[in-house]
Image (cartoon, grey):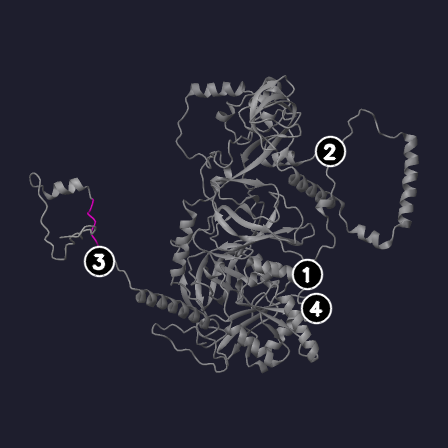
Amino acid sequence: MVAQGEKQQGHRPGVYKQKNKGHKHGKHRTKGEIERENKGRVSVIALTKKQRKEQRKIDRKNKANQLRKNKRDMVLTEKRRLGSRDGPPILVAVVSLHAAVDAGAVTKLLRQEGAGGVVHQEHSVSGASDSFGLVVPRFKQRFTVLRTNTDDIHSLLDVAKMADSLVFVLDSAEGWDSYGDYCLSCLFAQGLPSYALVCQGVSDLPVKKKVDCRRALSKVTEIRFPDARLFSLDTEQDVTLLLRHLGTQRQRKLGFRSRRSHLLGQHVTFTPSGSAGLGTLCVSGYVRGRPLQVDRLVHISGHGDFQLSQIDAPMDPLPLNATVPRASKPGKDGAVDMMDGGEADAPVRVLMKADPSCRESLQTEAEVDPMDGEQTWPTESELLEAEETRKNKRVMKVPKGTSDYQAAWIVDNDENDDPDEESSEDDDDCDDEMMDEAPDNESQDGGSDLPSEEDDDDGEEEEEEEEELCSTERAGPDQRYDEHVDEVAEEEDLKRYREARANEMFPDEVDTPLDMAAKIRFQRYRGLKSFRSSPWDPMENLPHNYSRIFQFQSFERTRRRILAEAAEEEEGAMVGWYVTLHVCDVPSSVMEGVQAGKPLVLVSLLPHEQKMSVMHLLVRRHPSNIDPIKSKEELVLHCGFRRFRASPIFSQHTSADKHKMERFLMPGTPSVVSVYAPITFPPTGVLLFKQRDDGVQDLVATGSLLSCDPRRVVLKRIVLSGHPFKINRRSAVVRYMFFNRDDIMWFKPVELRTKWGRRGHIKEALGTHGHMKCVFDSQLCSQDTVLMNLYKRIYPRWTYDPYVPLPLPWFKRESTVDVQDLDME
């Protein structure tokens, strides 16, 4: 018996519970009927731990340890390979960051025999005035040392893209000057490799002054280099410590160069061909980054893209066993080992030749036939009808690129028809200029202000007296200063400053023209109910330049696939080999640049990287630049290994499907720069320069490559403003937004808003002078302003130019104009 209050425990079956078959209802079903009823569905079967491959905690821990060990071994192998017998020499670039220091003294110390190295003066870099090869048997490493000229910012950036380590020479008192800080800004934005800080003259100071000097110098350098070690370079022992540090320091990887094979020209020769000004360029150097394939295109920095014909394998001019040269032993196939340093008269072995059927094309633009498509031959009656229609056709004002079918829907009044008057909206640039220009201050009265003949003579005498008086009273330095001032440039700068200030105070606001109908002036614009959610077709009314570019279905998927394939490539000239590349159809200007002292940098392009598309760069304005940078203004862009000139447009960086255009490059916020340029796969650094009239290039903005997407919609917004004239609760009479009745009826469907947050719409037009009755969601204030937002899609200019002029040495501008102090018109 179970006591009251106690619940009887239910029976729980054990492992030996009997399991009977289910009852079969009806007749027997065949396998086919069962499969048709299930329609491919499979019953869920409980998997065991072994089948699900579940690992215990100790197994997961062991697997993580193995992966960590493999990655560490890979990093150590790559580190030990650099500078050794199986890898390329460590490329060291000596950079001076102060005008008072001499980088040549550093290279002179590295040449001394007391450091324990063997100098190969003949192993120099083409285009470098002070370069040499250095073999240190004590460390079993070899180096290539070159001194860069900081006056040429292009050469400095090109060498920094290739160098394994940068040696910054600092001043013992100040560290670096203003130009040195400018160079560091460019190097950090591009991507800084491993580095070492060096100063001279500290060891000669007294002990107390030496400690104070080191403390002050460390305080200066910790801003840019918080964890850097400062080396004194005065004795041979200091040189040995520096070489040991350069050979064992951790190498900082740069994404844009580690995924591509690149080469710095050690020996360059040029052989002219039959074509005028073209020839074959033979460049010898060490392969770095990834294995080099002969069928891929190569890009020469500053000159363009070219094809390879073959790759040779000459003898290594900088063998590790330089002190005891020996003859190389032939391999099984009779090939010479390139790393043992063979005899000088050994024949050059051809590694590979390009296959014309597999070699990548130099085509940069898409070939589009304007006559491509289905066409029918017209009949005689259709031709006569078309000719008669053409004769009777009225001339209408339509925007550029509008078809006849689209023009038929544009309402044109007789009063606005003028066959002799051209359309004012011939191009987007005309729109920008007309809306951004301020009206000139002209005299409105009809009186004449011209002086008479009698007053003219007196005026000339007074002017002469004033000129003589000014010439005697003005001091000499002021006169010399005024001689270097360009008045035209000053007026243009002042105009840009005022435009930037006006755009900051009244963003996107434009004036409705008085001499032209607003529906004609702004017929390419449209209103949006919501900028975020309203649709906009990205394939609508595309310009002609979009037929010349390439587009990916998914740029991110293509980028991952190509980078993964590049990481797994094991064919071609391997990393560390000393090879000679035969580059076809190279202009003679490339060799002239080498003879003028410019380093020659070659990089192998990934697939599709020679094709043109719309590139988007995410940049932030550099703090040192205070000049307003207007949209569609020509800039010099450094994107990875490329540099070119273009006129980009600026837009906001948002996650929506539509992006608002910025008329100026805004400070303090990231902006997206859109430009027609060759495709480049990120990650890579981006630098924007603006060239002055005197040839100096100022750093404007820095950032990184965002994406390649021609479907990215950039909308330009204009704001038409009106003022309430009479207010009656929710309704109000608004004026000064339009000046005729037809314009009000044309823009009636567009929603209105106010600066105080009211929403409304146009109800009806009042009279013929532009007054309109509007209704809002609540009562309007008398000091409020009524606004109407209109949008149109804009595109960059096709101004891509791969040839960038050489910049002049940078100097700090002495005086600047403060935007806040300018008077607004």
Of the two numbered discs 2 and 4 on the same chain, state the one appearing first in sequence. 4
Give the position of the C terminus as an image quadrant: top right
Question: Which circle, 1 or 3, is nearer the viewer?
Answer: 3
Question: Which circle, 4 or 3, is nearer the viewer?
Answer: 3
Label 3 to label 2, Cα distance in Å?
A: 85 Å
Inspect this view and state whether residue 593 appears: no
Is residue 44 covered in magenta?
yes
Residue at horizontal 20 percent and vertical 47 percent from the top = 42
Residue 703 vertical position relative to residue 778 in the rendered view, above or below: below
**Residue position marked by numbered label 3 in the rendering:** 48
Label number found at residue 178: 1
Inspect this view and state whether residue 584 appears: yes
Q: Amino acid at mark 1?
A: Ser
Asked whether 22 or 634 is in front, the reply is 22
What are the residue bounds of the magenta stretch? 41-51
Q: Amino acid at mark 2?
A: Asp
**Residue position marked by numbered label 4 in the rendering:** 100
Q: x%, y% of residue 607?
A: 43, 53
